[in-house]
Every structure is written in structure tokens, then in C-alpha cells.
Image: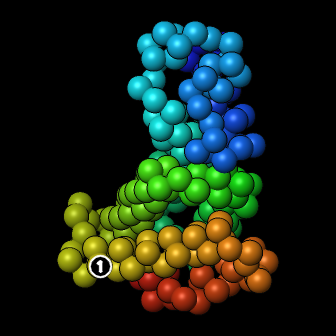
Amino acid sequence: MKTREIIIEAAFRLFEGRSFPEITVQDILDEAGVSRKTFYKYFRDKYELQEIYYLEQSSNVFDRHHLPEHMDDDTWRELSTGVLQFMKDHRQFYRNAGREKKAQDSLWSFLRQTLIDLYTEIRRRNTKQDTLSPGDQITVRCIVESIMKLFEIYTFETPALSMDALLDVGMTIIPVGYRFY
């Protein structure tokens, strides 16, 4: 394994188990067994590693290159279930990241833009248009903000609903958006 990957793996192990604000670059160095100079050869700070973590962990769920050409109700449910399963699998990390303002802002910004890109791509594929109309752009934003709210509730609160029930709520909250696609 290359040094860069060793550092990333070490950081990921720490991110999964501890609150992000508590983790220092020194902790990452100790976990990876590398020097400070080596760390800074590859990364500017722990926040860059956090961004890499987001990309690595979400690539299987949000990879728009693996989306079908047309999204029917079953495909929507499968994609949405995948997103919620991802949230469940990595809930502690997102809770930990959310305890620090800079980390939380980075998380929300990343997630919001990833979802906007995903739903924009889906809409473009289904309409076979290169750009979205202003109305389509508003609809994408509404869908994304609804998903962000569900993500926030599921991550930072103790949801009274199971994953399936939460998915049903999500599919009910924005039915026009889902049918729109």
C-alpha cells in the first residue's frame, strides 16, 4: 500500500470511531506511522482528509455514471434505499463530523453539491436536454433540500421511524419531485 493510502486509511479508522474535533494531525500520524513532513507532502490538513473520506464513502451511492437511463419508481426506491443505508452505515462518522462547525459546513456543502449534481444528471438523462430549465432547477433544489433535512434528522436526532418508514416519508414528502423524474 502506498504512503498516501496508508494515511487515508488511518484517518478513516479514526473518523469512524472518534469525534472529528478531537482528532489531531498528530493522531493521524501516530495511527499511520508516518512523519509530519510526510503527511504534509500529501495533504494540507485533516479537513482535506475529511473531504476525501466523503468522496470515498459516497462514490458507490452517488456515482452518476452508473445510473440507469430512466428512473422509474422501483429504481428511485432502490437509489433512495442505498442512500439511507449509506447514512445508516456511516451515521457515527457524520455525527462526529457535525460536532465541529467547519467540519459540519464542509459536510453539508459536499453532500448538497453531490445531490444537486446527481439529480441534475438524472433530469438531463430523462429529458435528453443539456441544461435544465429554471423550473427544473428549482425542483432539483427543493428535492435536494428535502433530502438534506431527512439526512439531518436521521443523522443528528434519534428518528422514531425505521429506515423503511423514513424512506416512505421521503417518497411522500416530495412525490411531485420523484414523479418529475
35 on left or right of 85: left
72 on left or right of 142: right
Task: Tell me where residue 96 appears, x and y as whole percent.
Answer: 64, 52
Q: Is residue 46 above or below residue 156?
A: above
Quarter of the picture containing the C terminus is bottom left
Quarter of the picture containing the N terminus is top right
Q: Quadrant of residue 124?
A: bottom left
Under circle 1, the secondary element is helix
Name the residue at 35% across, 74% down.
Answer: 141
Q: Is residue 47 above or below residue 160?
A: above
Q: Could one spot residue 75 in this view of the protein?
A: no
Name the residue at 54% across, 88% down.
Answer: 173
Q: Could one spot residue 16 in this view of the protein?
A: yes
Mark 1 sits on what residue?
138
Q: Quadrant of residue 136?
A: bottom left
The number of numbered badges drawn on the structure is 1
Q: Is residue 61 above or below residue 29?
A: below
Give the residue type that dot 1 points to.
Ile
Task: Tell me where residue 95 appears, x and y as whole percent.
Answer: 65, 58
Task: Tell me where residue 70 appears, x and y as whole percent.
Answer: 48, 67
89 on left or right of 140: right
Name the residue at 57% across, 70% down.
Answer: 152
Q: Quadrant of residue 91?
A: bottom right
Name the residue at 58% across, 10% down.
Answer: 35
Task: Tell me where residue 67 appears, x and y as whole percent.
Answer: 51, 56
Pick the residue in front: 117 or 152.
152
76 on left or right of 40: right
